[in-house]
Image (tube, coloured by chain):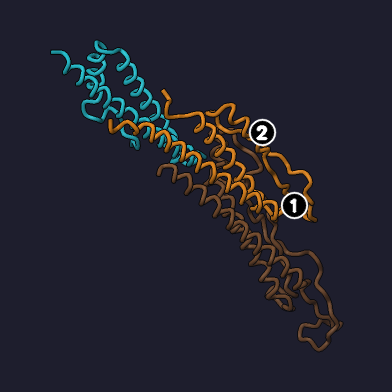
Amino acid sequence: MSLVDTPLMKSLASYLDVTAYRQGVVSANIANIDTPGYHARDINFKQELDKALGSPDAPLTPRTQGVPGLQERPDGNTVSLDREGLLLAQTQLQFTTGVALLRSELKRVSMAIQEDKGS
Amino acid sequence: MNLFGMMEVSASALGAERVRAEVVTSNLANAESTRTPEGGPYQRREVVFGTQRPSFALSLASAGAPMQDAGSSGVRVRGVVNDPAPPVVKYDPSHPDANADGYVAYPNINPVNEMADLMGAARAYEMNVSAITAAKQMIQQSIEILK
Amino acid sequence: MTIVPNLSTIPGMPALGAEMGAAAEGATPGFEETLRGAVQGVQQMENQAQQQVAGLLSGNGQDVHRAALAVEQANLSFELMLQVRNKVVSAYQEISRLQF
């Protein structure tokens, strides 16, 4: 009986999983800004999210891909600090939003359980 | 990738950029050093970076977990090497380090390049600190789920 | 070490559940099923939470938000079960008052 594990919670958990993973990829890009020959990577967020929503309890196996359209510097590195910095902030905001929505859903369930205490 | 591993990746970059900054400052300090204990002028040095898998990823891989991927590796200093470029020679017979023909060998260091390198290292360092802060905040927010 | 309270450590809980089930069955079959369902739900949630937290603590790449969610869900499940039990107990008492 999973009255407590609502579909919305499952979706939000998957959303948080994919968001956290993307943040990891962004962090790796930033860490390797000066590594010769390193090409910036990213995931297709929408695709990976759809995949995760389709099988909510399965562990994530996202595919990272190279980022098209980036300038390659003389040392072979394609990481753009501007792009990664923007993604860092954006992904963090996405995570914050996901957690807030999850907490509100948990609160809703909690209140539904408590509701009849007085009667 | 989990949030702790992410912090490890960013932390590896902090270490690497710091080494880079140290090497650059050493170059700057020795831009005019015509004599070293090994004989000859100071040889310009530079760092070589390479990717590195965070240690937990290796244990995960050995446990058979599926999430392995070159996109999530940290960075390490593969080595600090001497710049093979020959020293700059200037004609100055009165200099104490002048050779038989009156030429002095100076390190092949351009302070402008070194400064740009240093600024690059500082900016990268700053960016990685932001990444660590972001990961830290995400972990803290996750904990707040528990009220 | 359990982080979420283990049902069997609550004194009299299993016995109460069985008693409630047996007694309520005569009055209204719905009570028994609901209570049993709630108890099973808690067991399930609790196991999942323990698994997730163990994964987190052993540094296996488990994510904090997953573990936190699982623990919170186990807590809510437990709350739910308590509320259902309270309802069953009070309903039983009301019914037994009727039987003169």
Total labels: the figure holds 2
Q: Is residue C76 above or below residue A26?
A: above
Residue B57, numbered label: none
Front-lying residue, B22 or B126: B126
Say which colour chain B has.
Answer: brown
Q: Are marks 2 and 1 on the same chain?
A: yes
In the image, taking residue B23 as reference, residue C59 lies left or right, namely left
The residue located at (75%, 73%) in the rendering is B111
- The residue to which callout 2 is attached is A47
In the image, taking residue C10 as reference, residue A52 lies left or right, namely right
SS under mark 2? helix
In this orientation, does residue C55 appear? no
- The residue to which callout 1 is attached is A77
Q: Quadrant of the C terminus of chain A?
A: top left
The residue located at (36%, 27%) in the rendering is C42
- Return the chain for callout 2: A
SS under mark 1? loop
- Return the chain for callout 1: A
Front-lying residue, B57 or A19: A19
Q: Quadrant of the N terminus of chain A?
A: top left
Which one of the lettered chains is coloured cyan?
C
Q: How many C-alpha atoms fall within 10 Å of the one at disc 2: few (<14), some, or many (≥20)?
A: few
Quadrant of res B87: bottom right
